[in-house]
Image (tube, helix red, strand yellow):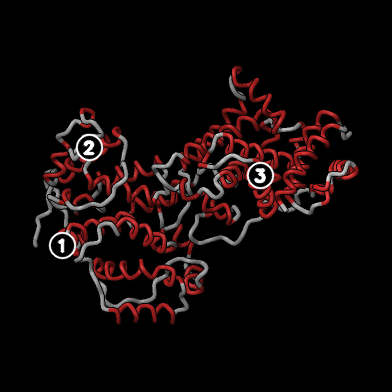
């Protein structure tokens, strides 16, 4: 089937004729929401880890296209009618209006006098295929490997994923395309698949074993798309795989950085100079929530920023801007940084490996918003109406001794844990046992990424308190459980700030009653 390259398809023209603001979003099958564009949007959202601004800007860039990369030109008329399977809600109404503007800009470009686009053999193969489902799967892969997507990855701190994280792209492509898989999806003989597996094994790769179902679908597809019949070993990018580790370690990252112009935009990234506080807060507050935070349609990201603002506002009341900077320097010097991962840019690799996945969830604009949030509260710590409420809360969460680094960190973690449970953030169920457990787990994690932090167990006031409670018959003090000791430590700090180093008779009794209940359940 030989199709001439169109200026714009009839489906696109129908979309441009609509006034998106006159249409109800529940208007059934009306073309105010083209499914092709919604499919492209969901592809971009999945690859951008749900980042709102990056998803929209990258999607609009792909809709408009450019001379080097015009993915919209691969669709043909009537593709809108193919069985798309389940689609998410898609862009907001204002974004559909922006998509119309981007499509008009594309039309102006391709319909200009003298414009001529020479289609590659790959593009002609995609447009000529009879099954629109296969065309959609091909367009999905081209989006994931596009220049626009590569630049979005770089903004989030990721190097080119076709080189360093091919496994991620295959998983994303498979999750998007499996609903579209037609009976005519390319296939290959089992013997060819077996030969590929043998080739991977011979090269020392084990990464393909975790992708059996994905590889069986992707390999014939990529063979058809690229016109390949003989496959060599593929570096999927898993550092647990010896073959990948050997291949990636030999890759000249410095040469790649210099050749990749997309990295220039990250020179002034808010984390470029290694500030620890914002990275620490995002890492600990997003711990265990990578999946919901990676979804464009989840409220988890909104909850994360609400939590960040609450913590930063209260920290700014207790900790002055100069003290904040001093603590940041101390944390930087105490930070334990693992070996760099070639899949991440330098500003990501200057943090512990356990933080890196969380840090790459956010776009540059989102990191700038966190920076501006800190600047806002350090210069003007909340409005008068909020200040009294926060001052009351900070007496509970941020004792006067919060200038001590270890107390400040524990207090921040306690505040964050309490906020998550009280607001039911990330769908957690409130409960003291779960809350204390999560807090002490977070405290333990801090000890694994910072060295030379003071030993809380050596604080004399804690020893006095535990001795006093043991004399009163509290068995919880003799239980070797880090959670009990951590709760004692944080509990003591506010009393110490009000009553000096003296241990009162009432605070240990109140604490002991609570801890005994906890200790019984812990054991």
The residue that appears at 23% across and 40% down in the rendered structure is: 33
Q: Residue at x 38, y 70 (%)?
A: 212
Circles 2 and 1: CB atoms closer than 8 Å: no
* Residue 495, placed above or below residue 264: above
Q: Are the residues flagged by discs 3 and 1 in contact, CB closer than 8 Å?
A: no
Q: Spatial distance from mark 3 to mark 1, Cα to Cα?
A: 59 Å
| Mark closest to the chain's N terminus, 3 or 1 | 1
Residue at (56, 55) in percent of width and height: 349
Residue at coordinates 25% horizontally, 47% vertically from top-left?
Answer: 65
Residue 127 x, y percent position in the rendering: 16, 58
Residue 373 or residue 19, whichever sits in front: 19
Residue 407's tag is none
CA gap between label 3 and label 2 equals 52 Å
Judge the density around disc 2: few (<14), some (14-19), many (≥20) Cα neighbours within 10 Å. Answer: many
Task: Classify residue 135 by image quadrant.
Answer: bottom left
- On residue 129, the disc is 1
Where residue 239 sits: x, y (%)?
51, 67
| Picture coordinates of residue 158, whole percent (x, y) | 46, 54
Identify the residue position indicated by label 2 in the image.
100
Q: Tell me: 404 left or right of 506.
A: left
Dot 2 lies on which element? helix
Residue 216 higher or lower than 358, as above or below: below
Disc marking residue 433: 3
User: Could you give the CA–CA distance between mark 2 and mark 1, rounded to whole angstroms?
Assistant: 27 Å
């Amino acid at each position: 089937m030989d199709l001439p390259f169109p200026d714009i398809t009839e489906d696109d023209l129908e979309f441009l004729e609509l006034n998106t603001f006159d249409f109800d979003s529940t208007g059934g099958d009306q073309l105010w929401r083209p499914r092709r564009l919604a499919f492209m949007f969901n592809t971009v959202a999945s690859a951008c880890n749900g980042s709102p601004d990056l998803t929209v800007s990258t999607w609009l860039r792909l809709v408009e296209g450019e001379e080097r990369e015009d993915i919209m030109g691969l669709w043909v008329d009537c593709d809108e009618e193919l069985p798309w399977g389940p689609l998410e809600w898609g862009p907001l109404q204002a974004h559909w209006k922006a998509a119309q503007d981007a499509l008009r800009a594309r039309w102006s470009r391709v319909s200009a006098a003298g414009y001529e686009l020479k289609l590659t053999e790959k593009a002609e193969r995609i447009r000529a295929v009879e099954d629109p489902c296969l065309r959609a799967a091909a367009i999905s892969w081209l989006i994931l490997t596009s220049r626009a997507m590569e630049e979005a990855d770089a903004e989030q701190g990721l190097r080119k994923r076709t080189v360093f994280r091919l496994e991620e792209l295959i998983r994303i492509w498979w999750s998007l395309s499996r609903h579209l898989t037609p009976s005519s999806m390319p296939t290959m003989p089992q013997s060819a698949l077996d030969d590929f597996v043998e080739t991977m094994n011979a090269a020392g790769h084990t990464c393909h074993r975790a992708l059996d179902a994905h590889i069986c679908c992707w390999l014939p597809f990529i063979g058809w798309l690229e016109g390949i019949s003989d496959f060599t070993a593929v570096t999927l990018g898993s550092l647990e795989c010896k073959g990948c580790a050997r291949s990636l370690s030999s890759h000249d990252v410095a040469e790649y950085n210099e050749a990749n112009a997309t990295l220039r935009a990250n020179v002034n990234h808010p984390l470029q100079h290694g500030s620890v506080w914002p990275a620490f807060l995002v890492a600990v507050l997003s711990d265990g929530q990578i999946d919901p935070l990676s979804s464009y349609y989840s409220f988890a990201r909104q909850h994360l920023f609400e939590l960040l603002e609450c913590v930063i506002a209260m920290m700014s009341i207790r900790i002055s801007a100069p003290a904040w900077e001093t603590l940041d320097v101390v944390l930087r010097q105490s930070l334990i940084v693992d070996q760099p991962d070639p899949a991440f840019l330098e500003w990501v690799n200057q943090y512990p490996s356990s933080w890196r996945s969380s840090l790459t969830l956010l776009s540059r604009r989102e990191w700038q918003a966190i920076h501006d949030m800190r600047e806002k509260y350090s210069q003007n710590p909340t409005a008068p109406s909020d200040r009294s409420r926060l001052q009351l809360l900070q007496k509970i969460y941020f004792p006067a001794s919060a200038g001590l680094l270890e107390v400040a960190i524990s207090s921040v973690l306690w505040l964050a844990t309490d906020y998550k449970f009280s607001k039911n953030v990330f769908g957690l169920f409130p409960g003291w046992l779960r809350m204390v457990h999560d807090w002490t787990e977070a405290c333990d994690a801090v000890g694994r990424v910072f060295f030379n932090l003071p030993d809380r167990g050596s604080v004399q006031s804690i020893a006095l308190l535990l001795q006093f409670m043991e004399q009163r018959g509290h068995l919880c003090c003799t239980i070797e459980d880090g959670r009990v000791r951590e709760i004692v430590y944080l509990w003591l700090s506010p009393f110490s700030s009000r009553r000096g180093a003296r241990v009162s008779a009432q605070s240990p009794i109140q604490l002991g009653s609570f801890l005994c209940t906890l200790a019984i359940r812990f054991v």
